[in-house]
Amino acid sequence: MVRRKIVFGLVVCLLTAMLIGQSLSQPGQRGQRGQRTGGQDRQDQGAGGRQFDPERMRQMMEQRMKEMLNATDEEWKVLGPYVMKVQELSRQVGGGGRGGMMSGRGGRGPGGNQTRQRQGAQNRELTDVEKIQEELQTLLENTEATPEKIKELLTKLRGAKEKAKQELAKAQQDLRKILTLRREAQLVLMGLLD
């Protein structure tokens, strides 16, 4: 189980690094003629002044998954929602949610981390796990937070993760029903199925 989590984490990190590299190498991500935009827009920019687009990142990740499974457009219309649901639930269960290292909370530049934290969730509603993680992170930033309140939110977070774990098991079962053996094996190697 631990090995599977490590493999899954490595796959997610590798995919994320590849996607970030691709998005940063795309032209047109800066202001006109390579000029940086100033003021408030700077906090939403990634390395080199390029603006981070979470929707574009999601699309690139989805495209990469489609390619790895060697799925046609028609096949992906069926497979895609199942695969992406399993991926999202795996991320929640594995601890790589909004409070994890990959969330971008570590860098607290101008504008505070609240803007940066919300950046990836602009186009979707936060999950229960993400909402509780945000609440707990905010609480932990308060040096006067009581141990009782921390324990309460930690228990709540563990409950939400357990619920996500049960949803993940069902989503994995549903996905297996529509997979070929080759695709199932590929998803096992990627860490999305056991």
Image (cartoon, helix red, strand yellow):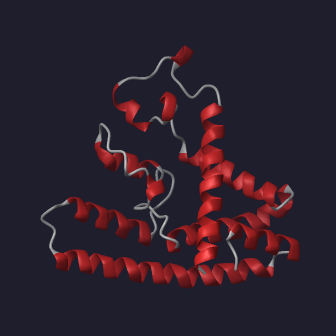
**Does residue 143 appear to the left or right of 95 in the view shown?**
left
Question: Would you place residue 85 above or below residue 70 in this image?
Answer: below
Q: Nearer the viewer, residue 109 or 122?
A: 109
Q: Give me the residue at 15% from left, 73% from top.
A: 146
Q: Indicate the quadrant where residue 130 lies.
A: bottom left
Q: Nearer the viewer, residue 147 or 161?
A: 147
Residue 149, position in %: x, y? 20, 76
Residue 57, position in %: x, y? 60, 47
Residue 48, position in %: x, y? 50, 29
Q: Give me the residue at 52% from left, 72% from top.
A: 94
Q: Give me the residue at 34% from left, 26% from top.
A: 39
Q: Nearer the viewer, residue 39 or 102?
A: 102
Pick out the residue farthest to the front. Answer: 3
Q: Indicate the quadrant where residue 3 lies.
A: bottom right
Say which quadrant the C terminus sits in.
bottom right
Q: Give me the residue at 51% from left, 78% from top.
A: 164
Say which quadrant the N terminus sits in.
bottom right
Q: Indicate the quadrant where residue 99 lies.
A: bottom left
Q: How many circles with numbers are drawn on the protein?
A: 0
Pick out the residue farthest to the top. Answer: 33
**Does residue 135 appear to the left or right of 149 in the view shown?**
right
**Does residue 141 appear to the left or right of 1 in the view shown?**
left
Residue 128, position in %: x, y? 42, 72
